[in-house]
Image: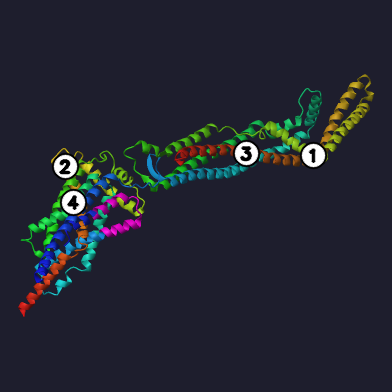
Amino acid sequence: MQNRSEHRADAHTQTQPQLARRSRGWLLLAGFGLAAVLAWQTSQYTQLSWGAGQRWDVVLDDQHYQLGTAQLQWLEDFSAGHFAADSDELRQQLALQLDARLDMAFAQVVARLPDFADWYYSVGGEYSRLSMTLLGHLNVVDGGYVARRAAEMLFPDPAWEGALLRLDNDATQLMLQQQAQSQSAWLSELQRRLSSNRVPAPIMPTADAAESTLLLDGLVTQIQALQQTAMMDARLTLSTTGAAAVAGPALWRAVSTRAALKGSGAAIAARGAGKVATRTASGAAAGAAVCMPGGPLAVACAAVAAAGTWVATDWLLLQVDEALNRDQLLAGLEEGLAALRVELEAELLLAYEARIDAWQQSANTQIEQTFSPYRAR
Amino acid sequence: MRSVGAQTIMLLVLVTLLWLLFLCARVWTTPVALGLWLLLTALVARGLFLRARLRRRAWLQMYLHPASALVPRLGGGPLLMGMQTVLAAALALLLMVTMAGGSHPQMWFWLIGSALLLPSLACGLERVLAAQANPALLAELAWRLSGVIVGVGLLLAFTLQAYVQSYPDFSAVSLEQAVWHLAGQQQARSEATLAVLQGAAAAEGVRLWLAQQLLPTPAESLWQALGWVLLLAQEALFIWSYLLACRGIVMLHSAGSSVHRLHTREGESIENTHAESL
């Protein structure tokens, strides 16, 4: 019994190292198996990549900047917003400048009003009006003589056209100057804001790199070309309202309308009829009285005396008319000029704004064309 | 003492961890990266701390009286551990960056081979040195010798691989372009990982640019080739940190055995000295 238990104990002590050796062997085998699996796996997989979004290589003035898609969108918004804001500012400046220049131009016209009134109430003026009216009725000349005369006197060709030309030149210069400043400020601001994203030029340009490269230099060139085009197109923006041939009749129409509204037209007509009756009566009476003893020369004498009396009567009546109605005429003319000025200013502003809008629209188109291919990706 | 098989498996687990780290480095989140960094730091710190304590013990035994009160105080405590942890954090970061930065396929075969070889070699050396080495430190000595042998082998292999590897041509570009070329290619989900990878890529760019500017044609002379080899010596740091991590993971369950045995022998020695003096 005791021998059997000793034998069992010996067997047990002999089995322990064997088991340990066997387990170590299994572990080693498992290790080799694991190594083989690991070696196989490492050859099967590559590193997982992380796509952090498209990066764009923006080139501006030979400097490279790296931007994300969101930054690119910001760049587009900033560019469009910048030119829109500058266009608004330009409109305001232009309106102020236009106001000042028109004030100057119309002040000169107002200064010419007394000359026109002097002509209007002169004998020569009266007779030329009558002659032109008569010729107009006979279809020898066109009507509207007074309006044409008003245009000649109030809007004289070199002075008025020159004033409008200067006004237009100043406006064009202001626009070009402001647009150039706007471009310069846009470029500087762009470079300032991009500076934090500056990167060196890529060393190996590839096809992928070319696809993700945005040449802002191209946009700058295109916008500068717009500037050149604007300079080429800086032609006179004289409005139809501002043309002397139109301004004069328009002004006289305004005066006539005002006079008609106030009932002066009937008075003027009555005055004309009265003048004719008075002149005829007084001329005939004067001729008969002065030349009655003249014998055979009495007829010629009567004609001369009647003509003299006719002119003298006219002059006298015109003096009376002037004394009564000159202020009213001048007031009407000034009122008409004010209306003409408002109309002219509105028309010029519209024309300049159209130019500004066209420029801004062109700039926006260039900006959109530059950025849209990248926005689509 | 664990068996060779168990140690092999543990080392293979470490290599697997490093491989997973390589695979997922670009897509992991910052907390995951931080956790892995702490784990690797702990493993490397374990290996470093053991070596530091052994060095400290050897110094103390050499210069101080065994009964000195300074011996237990200077034996290596939290301060030493803190210093080694800082070094370990840097080495673990280097290990992670090297792994995450991409690797050539042969590297995994060498690392797997080293995981298979290290325990077997240590076991063999342990038997060879059994008659000559201090029994308390026999296993540590065998492990360190095998680590040196495997490390030199890995260094040679990596250096050779780096030598024949093709690099971007930076000979005609500026340093800034070279740095950006490599740093700009880095992408990662985690911002922290991306920053570290970009920093490492920038350093790589500086290294390659300098190498190509100063040593334009590496194959022309032996000196130039040697210069390249020196420039590639950073591989040594990677291998060192890898071997420390290996030591750390192997020590997980036989932790501090060498130091413990050394402590025991020191205690016995002190007691004997005390008895003799009495």
Residue at mark 3 to residue at mark 2: CA–CA distance: 77 Å
Determine whether label 3 and label 1 are within 8 Å by CB. Answer: no
Q: Position of residue B219 (x, y in %)?
A: 17, 38
Say which quadrant the C terminus of chain A sits in. top left
Picture quadrant of residue B123: bottom left
Determine whether label 4 and label 2 are within 8 Å by CB. Answer: no
Residue at mark 3 to residue at mark 1: CA–CA distance: 31 Å
Give the magenta-colored segment's residue range: B13-40
| Vertical arrangement, residue A63 with respect to residue B87, above or below | above
Amino acid under disc 1:
Ala
Q: Chain of mark 4?
A: B
Q: Position of residue A348 (x, y in %)?
A: 63, 38
Q: Chain of mark 3?
A: A
Q: Is residue A122 left or right of residue A367?
A: right
Camera-side mark, 4 or 2: 4
Q: Position of residue A340 (x, y in %)?
A: 69, 39
- Which residue does the numbered mark 2 point to in the structure image? B225
Relative to the observer, which residue lies in front, B123 or A36?
Answer: A36
- Which residue does the numbered mark 4 point to in the structure image? B114
Residue B198 visible in the displayed image: no
| Vertical arrangement, residue A219 with respect to residue A21, above or below | above
Determine whether label 1 and label 2 are within 8 Å by CB. Answer: no
Amino acid under disc 4:
Ser
Q: Chain of mark 2?
A: B
Q: Is residue A158 left or right of residue A307?
A: left
Relative to the observer, which residue lies in front, A360 or B268?
Answer: B268
Residue closest to the far bottom: B278
